[in-house]
Image (cartoon, rainbow, N blue to C red):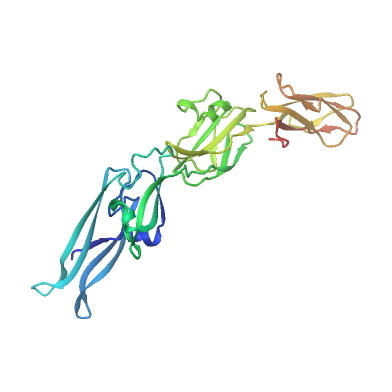
Amino acid sequence: MRKAVFFGVLAIFSLFLPRLILAESGCGGIDFCQSTKIVNEYTCREIEGSCQKEGAGTQTIDCTVTEDECYGFQYTPRCAYNLLGACEEQGFTRKKVSCCSGAGGGGGQDCPSGEYELVKECKPTNQCPADRTGAKCGQGKKWCYSLVCVGCTATAPTNLTFTPFQSGSSAVVSWVDGAGGTSNRLYVDSRKEDVDADCPNGQGSGNGKCLYVNNNASSGVAVSGLSLGTVYYVKVVNYKDGTCSANSSILSDVSSCFISPSGPVNMKVGDKQTFTTSVNTSLEIQRVDFSAPPGNISITPGSDTNGADGYKTEVTALNSTSPTVTLTSDVYFTGNPTPVC
């Protein structure tokens, strides 16, 4: 049993798709290239004593809008009995519809974003070029299609976080995906300028991985190979194509901020103990604050703003009511009132 195919593309545009986003220029004529075409299939079979046409479901066919030409076929089947009495498709007509990219008004335009939007307007028939005319939309009017250059539709990833593992040699990077892209690209490096420039040649000059995941990065990526106590810069790009992408803001964080000795440290009256963080010096760091549970001790300095020889402080036990000391530290970046670790 043979099947016939009916392409109702323009009718679908008229009824259901007043606006359609295309990645490249489309084409005019009776049909328009799309990312997919919906195909209605029919069969002929005997129903209640007569040879009738019956729907046989739907399917989709890819139609790449970047091709120079796209083709469609419109069938108008008629079901009838043949000389042997079998119900079959007979006397159908076939109309070939072809269109070249750009014929619909998009090709040849200066469109920096590389993205077009197919729009339609209900116009008098004599006001629409024949190669852009669709179905009737009123008395003496038809839908008139055109391609308009639009801006980049990709949106930036948000809520970027950098969560180090306790070892300080790896961290988990998470975010909320942006919309309108085809893949995510993750950049991690200890040099901000490399991350800001999308890691030229895929390599950074710092200690990080820079272009850590080129395509299809998913939130929750575990980044390994980090250096202990180092400031890292992280960015996620929602990539659509060579002319359209959206960047998250650049996040800065520290791979670890342990303090040594980790405590509790037993101390006697008059004892002095130096505590040093694992954080390496960085222009990004404004200061490191030190604190301990209330007790008869002194902490000097309470804040270290110069990490040239390590961010550290000295604790002195003032009397025997403080036999043990556990020190903690908070790392502050310039312009950020909240400690990063």
35 or 26: which is nearer to us? 26
Within the image, what quadrant is residue 91 found in? bottom left
Residue at left offset 64%, top offset 35%: 166
Q: Position of residue 303 (x, y in %)?
A: 78, 27
In the displayed structure, does residue 91 sit left or right of residue 111? left
Image quarter in which the C terminus is found: top right
Say left or right for 118 vs 262: left
Q: Residue furthest front?
A: 126
Q: Is residue 278 visible?
A: no
Viewer-proximal residue among 307 and 193: 193
Image side of residue 230 versus residue 48, left or right: right
Question: Residue 171: percent from the left, percent from the top?
Answer: 59, 36
Residue at (28, 51) in percent of width and height? 131
Q: Position of residue 333 (x, y in %)?
A: 69, 31
The residue positioned farthest toward the bottom in the image shown: 49
The relative height of residue 308 versus residue 77 in the rendered view (above or below) is above
Q: Is residue 136 visible?
A: yes
Residue appearing at x 86%, y 32% in the figure: 323
**Quadrant of residue 127 in the image?**
bottom left
Please report the residue visible at 67 percent of the width from the left and 24 percent of the height from the top: 283
